[in-house]
Amino acid sequence: MALIALVSATSGAVTTAAAALALASRRPVLLAELDMAGGSLRHGLLRDVPRGPHREPLDGRIGIHRLPQAQWEQAGADGEFTPQMAEHLWPLDDSDYRVALPGLTDPRQAASLAGIWPTLLNMLQLTDQQLRWDVVVDGGRVAWEGGRLHPVLTPAPVLREADLVLLVVRADEEAQQALAYPAVQALQQELTGHSRGIHPLGLLLVGDGYRGAEVARALGAPVLAALPWDPAAAGYLRCGGRMPRAVGRSRLLRAARDAMGPLREHADRRRLMLQMRGAVPATAGVARVVEQLARRGGGHD
């Protein structure tokens, strides 16, 4: 139903916020960990989540960093590397319709992703638009080169095509707001060129004791979502381990659940205003991956 990317001007909170939105969604969801500084889900939330009937553990053979190798191995062959993407999806919990694409194991792997961005973006858009899943992207900390999104250190192709880009801000810390302001200005300029004048950028505020209207006015961007400071639930999302019994009823997950509906509606309005054309499979391989995901999400629309 929406392709939502989360980023920050400073490190921290993005992965936790993205995981909260993904786990709180009432729809099938794909959480793509595209932080070019390296992924943390495999060492935290996913570390004790097994996969399949043999309950295999997550290891370094799974993740976005393996996709360029799959593409190289299929070069010149009859098949495509795209169906292998499905092998790199990992369950977020004991359901079969909340999955994650784990991130890099080493920041030096980021440069190798240049050739797979068009295919990966196509898959994310189809999962959103055709399957009507929620797609949440952990974009990590934004990095710049010459005033533009860095082509290697950020998932720039995905950010430019996302329905919404949420800048995660600790609203109760003045230093975070000060650092967020130039990021808002740069992102608005960057994303406007790819959205024909309609801004996909908004703020996701983390913390308590602030006024959203004041933060929006200070930073020059609308507040589209807010999550409370909830150390217990955030600790589980960040570090993993045994799921607390009441985590689904925690302040954090309840707020994330309340936020997802308005975020989808905002994305739908933006698409309608832009009269955006729906994505179509760029290759037969992408279509097969989407079919596999459709079987996972059957009955949970």
Image (cartoon, grey):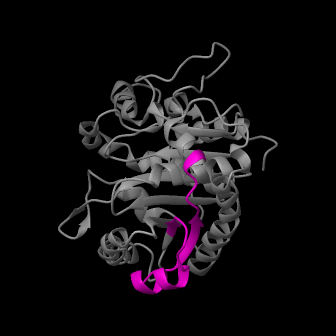
Q: Quadrant of residue 69?
A: top left
Quick check: 13 left or right of 266?
Answer: left
User: Could you tell me which quadrant the N terminus lies in?
Assistant: bottom right
Image location of residue 58, percent across then percent down = 50, 24
Q: Is residue 74 above or below residue 199?
A: above
Asked if residue 98 can be seen in this view, the reply is: yes
Q: Which residue sits at x=45%, y=22%? A: 59
Q: Nearer the viewer, residue 247 or 188?
A: 247
Residue 74 colored magenta? no
Image location of residue 272, percent across then percent down = 63, 77
Residue 209 colored magenta? yes
Q: Is residue 301 above or below residue 172?
A: above
Image location of residue 45, percent across then percent down = 53, 36
Q: Which residue is most to the top?
A: 54
Q: What segment carries the magenta color?
A: 204-232
Q: Which residue sits at x=36%, y=73%? A: 174
Q: Is residue 86 above or below residue 297?
A: above
Q: Nearer the viewer, residue 137 or 158?
A: 137
Image location of residue 250, percent across then percent down = 69, 51
